[in-house]
Image: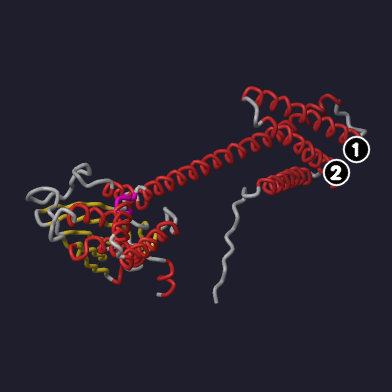
Amino acid sequence: MSVTRIQPQPFFADKNRAFWNLQSLGWAGAFLLRGSSTVANGQPFSSLIPVLISTVTGYSVTLLIAVVFRFLLKQRPIITWGVSILTVVLAAGLVAFIDAWVFSTQNRASETAGLQLFLGAFYLSVTLIGAWSALYYAINFYLTVEEQADQLLRLENQAANAQLAMLRYQLNPHFLFNTLNSISTLVLLKQTDRANAMLSRLSSFLRYTLINEPTAQVTIEQEIETLKLYLEIEKMRFEDRLRTSFSIDPAVAKARLPSLLLQPLVENAIKYAVTPKEEGADISVSAQPAGENVRIIVSDSGPGLNEGGMKPHIPMSEGTGVGLPNIRDRLIQAFGERQSFETRSTPGGFSVIIEFPLNMDETSKVAA
């Protein structure tokens, strides 16, 4: 039996509700503070009536101030601050006038002069409303900064996804043109069975590339199955000249990687190892655990890039086409610094070694 946990919503997720909560709690706190101070000074409980009226007045006036401030937030700074200060002074004067009137009505025998009473109430009112206004602007500034940070994060994610999609769509289309030319040749030679088989396999491969999101990740197992679809197409072109082998450790079969990450590597191997040699070449793909990472090696038995010597880090411009820089960029976009990309060339072949974190497919975790 699974228990669904309800994640608590952020306090400011609903700004309108947050405002009313803060407004009510703030003025309730002000009433309790002033009321307890009045009772503590030995005043009768009837003295709480002016405090209650003052609190209700402040509560109502600040609602009107909030409407003004909401408009001022969109104005130039000089207008915002100038009108805000004037609004606070006028509102404090209104609250002080009502407080002084209520006090004088309740205490007709008091000898306190009207002006003196008003100034005392004004000092208290301008302090409360000034603090309320400062808090209002501080909270709105905080929310504005949070919104800008969220928007920047969304834009960064969109840019990263767009770059990932662009890299996926940069997959070398030469094999598509070559396959279509091969199909056309088979049709002209009236080898319709082979042409239909090649067309069917091409359709399956293209369907996979179109169904999957360009930024999606798949398991190594799924990636290898798709790679085999691609190789079946190429084998119809190269026949026995293209020899492939796979060694996938079951421990990493469910590890996730960007879709169609390996296809450009195999395509490069076909282009630079199988095509130039009359006897063709062997291409091997292996995936093994490497600590907390997955290590994938795509190697061929072609002529390599240079005569003799091993060069672990070959510049991307030395005849490797668009495939290798594409793979490196996609790895960086998907895993950041937690990945490595290495190429090795010898007279007996060329290898690409990539490593990335061992992130298992969620369904395999549940099954385990």
Give the side of residue 104 with respect to residue 68, left or right. right
Where does the C terminus fall, quadrant-wise?
bottom left
Q: Is residue 159 above or below residue 209?
A: above
Which of the colour schemes (rainbow, by chain, secondary structure, one colour) is used?
A: secondary structure
Q: For residue 186, which quarter of the picture?
A: bottom left
Residue nearest the viewer, comparing 229 with 190: 190
Q: For residue 75, which quarter of the picture?
A: top right
Extreme residue in the left direction: 308
Q: Give the residue number, with chain letter if any, for mark 2.
A: 49
Q: Secondary structure at mark 1?
A: helix
Residue nearest the viewer, comparing 55 with 120: 55
Q: For residue 26, which quarter of the picture?
A: top right
Q: Residue at x 18, y 57 (%)?
A: 274
Counting from the top left corner in percent of width and height, residue 269 is at 21, 55
Residue type beneath disc 2: Ile
Extreme residue in the bottom direction: 1
Residue type beneath disc 1: Gln
